[in-house]
Amino acid sequence: MSVQERKERERADRERLIVATARELAEHQGWDAVTTRRLAERIEYSQPVLYSHFRGKREIIGAVALQGAGELAVAVRAATAAADGSRARVHALAHAYLDFARRNPAVYDAIFQLDGGLPYAREDTPEPLKDAFAALLETLGEVAGDGIEPGLFTETVWASLHGLATLTRSGRLPPEDAERRVELLVDRLPRI
């Protein structure tokens, strides 16, 4: 291995460590606790080293969002692949999405609530974000119904799931009715 390859590998390892540490800190103490000073202390590197990877917290949030979007896509695809029939796939998608949001609240916020400097719904949207949407579209597009644009339909169902995730987490919807809400949503889709 050349010196250059070793330096690139070390740089990539440091970057992964920064992102993993930010995620861990955010999941346990919230995003307000994620500061470059605290991250530098935790990973035992100086703040200038952090700034050589990320210009600040916003870019760190963006990196967590991209990583999380990839994980969300994997979770949704795994859940829907194991389901038999369109109704079961949509049900599995809804549960995978809501479970991801519940198990990873800081990552979910990085993807959908916080400013990570990432463009959404544009040509230059990063691939992991596009792939997370594609994972939803693969299942929801097949049940959109005649004359309904699959992308628009997917956006609408996604918005419903996002609302359920955020309203339940904030205590504005009672958690004991979570399954009934999913059933109601799934049962009202056009072609299941």
Image: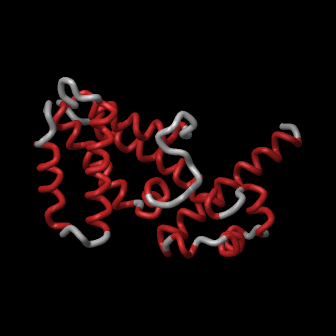
Q: Does 53 appear above or below 128?
A: below
Q: How is the image coloured?
A: secondary structure
Residue 78 % position (x, y): 34, 39
Residue 55 % position (x, y): 72, 59
Residue 159 % position (x, y): 31, 49
Q: Residue at x 13, y 49 (%)?
A: 183
In-front residue for pair 127/115: 115
Would residue 36 be found to the left or right of residue 132 on screen?
right
Would residue 30 be found to the left or right of residue 15 on screen?
left
Q: Residue at x 83, y 37 (%)?
A: 1
The mark total stands at 0
The answer to which image quadrant residue 178 occupies is bottom left
Would residue 146 be found to the left or right of residue 31 on screen?
left
Q: Residue at x 25, y 47 (%)?
A: 94
Q: Does 186 appear above or below 104?
A: above
Would residue 25 be found to the left or right of residue 88 on screen?
right
Q: Does 187 appear above or below 14?
A: above
Residue 10 % position (x, y): 77, 50
In-front residue for pair 60/148: 148
Q: Residue at x 76, y 61 (%)?
A: 51
The answer to which image quadrant residue 47 occupies is bottom right
Query: Which quadrant would the C terminus be assigned to in this image?
Result: top left
Residue at the outermost top position? 146
